[in-house]
Amino acid sequence: TLSPFWNISLWVALGVFTSLLAFLPKPLGILFLLVSLILRAIYTMGLAPALLLLGAVNLFNKLVFLVSFVGNQGTFTRGYKAVVMDMLFIYHLGYAIICVLGLFVHEFFYSFLLFDLVIREETLLNVIKSVTRNGRSIILTAVLAIFLVYFFSIIGFLFLKDDFRMEVDRLPTPGKGDQLSNNEVAGSCTKDSCPLSTPQPGPDDGTERVCDTLLMCIITVLNQGLRNGGGVGDILRRPSKEEPLFAARVVYDLLFFFIVIIIVLNLIFGVIIDTFADLRSEKQRKEEILKTTCFICGLERDKFDNKTVSFEEHIKSEHNMWHYLYFLVLVRVKDPTEYTGPESYVAQMIAVSKQNKHALHKQEIVTHTSFIPPKNVFPQSCLTIKAVDLFAS
Ligand SMILES: [Zn+2]
């Protein structure tokens, strides 16, 4: 059901974006084409077939990706254990499973795929990490909160049982209002599984005692106490000042408010917010370092002031990190008998570096300390610096 104007304009958009595909920059052009194609498919075929088609394409794409992912990472050559431990592989496997479920079980499973955005966007990933990174302290603080809740519910159970009265909204029971549905229920159910046709006789002021057992007390304090801004005192009966337990209630409510609501809950929030701030500043520092220091030699941008080469020139032509990587790959794939002098030197250095790494890994003391690269420098890059120095000389 689409007005003719939009119908035609969708066709036109599809045609325009198809023809523009060659001219627009690649990601943008493909994006526009896909959006117009999907919209066109929805209105031409109907929503359900379009979804089925898209789901099938998505599943096929994911399976191809998964196979190539496994091949590129060498997941299966590393053994069964490495497969299970590889979080990224498990993530993509789960993604594929959700695609299958969405295609064959129910379309609502596709909603889980929205979480893919969290994995792709670092800021959102930091939101998750801000909870999980200091998970231990958060959980311990939460356990402390539960201890306190337990403590307060014991006191409530022992001394303030009568104050735990809560307003409840009872569901309209079949016995009271709807005679017809009551008859239906009575006719269809067996004797012992029949719902009680008469409502529980209770005080008809709409309140209920919620602390008659210790378990009920704990549940009430945990549920209502933590969720109310003023603590558990918000939901308890408001005592008159003539009552003997008035002072006790004041102390009880105040203590709960200060200890649980103000201190413990805010400790948990504080940990989460601090972790998020830390992660953000860490990310900024990383970006700062990547922008202002040379990846190969570690010289900062300001060291190039008043020099003949600028920093941009330095990281583009003198110390281009990708050139180093290409050279390492070249050394790896080239036949060793065809090495030039510098290449064989670099190959030798890589072999030594690997040996040393292996030795360090086994916690052995390596006597050839001169071969061990400094800890904070990328080991192979510092070897290639020597190689490039050889080129220069
Ligand atoms: Zn450099």
Image (spheres, rainbow, N blue to C red):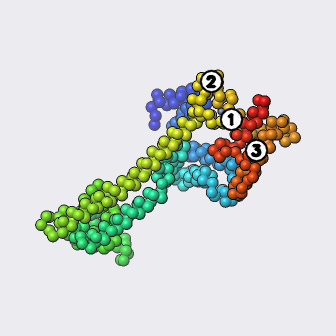
In percent of width and height, residue 242 lies at 12, 66
Q: Quadrant of the C terminus?
A: top right
In percent of width and height, residue 73 lies at 69, 49
- Residue type highlighted by circle 1: Trp
The CA span between labels 2 and 3 is 33 Å
Secondary element at image label 1: helix
Secondary element at image label 3: helix
Q: Is residue 24 above or below residue 236?
A: above
Kindly indicate the quadrant of the structure image that contains residue 257.
Answer: bottom left
In the depicted view, which residue is nearer to us: 67 or 41? 67
In percent of width and height, residue 327 lies at 75, 36
- Residue type highlighted by circle 2: Lys
**Which one is in front in this view, the residue at disc 2 or the one at disc 3?**
2
Label ID, residue 307 = 2
User: Which residue is labeled 1 in the image?
Assistant: 322
User: Which residue is labeled 3 in the image?
Assistant: 350
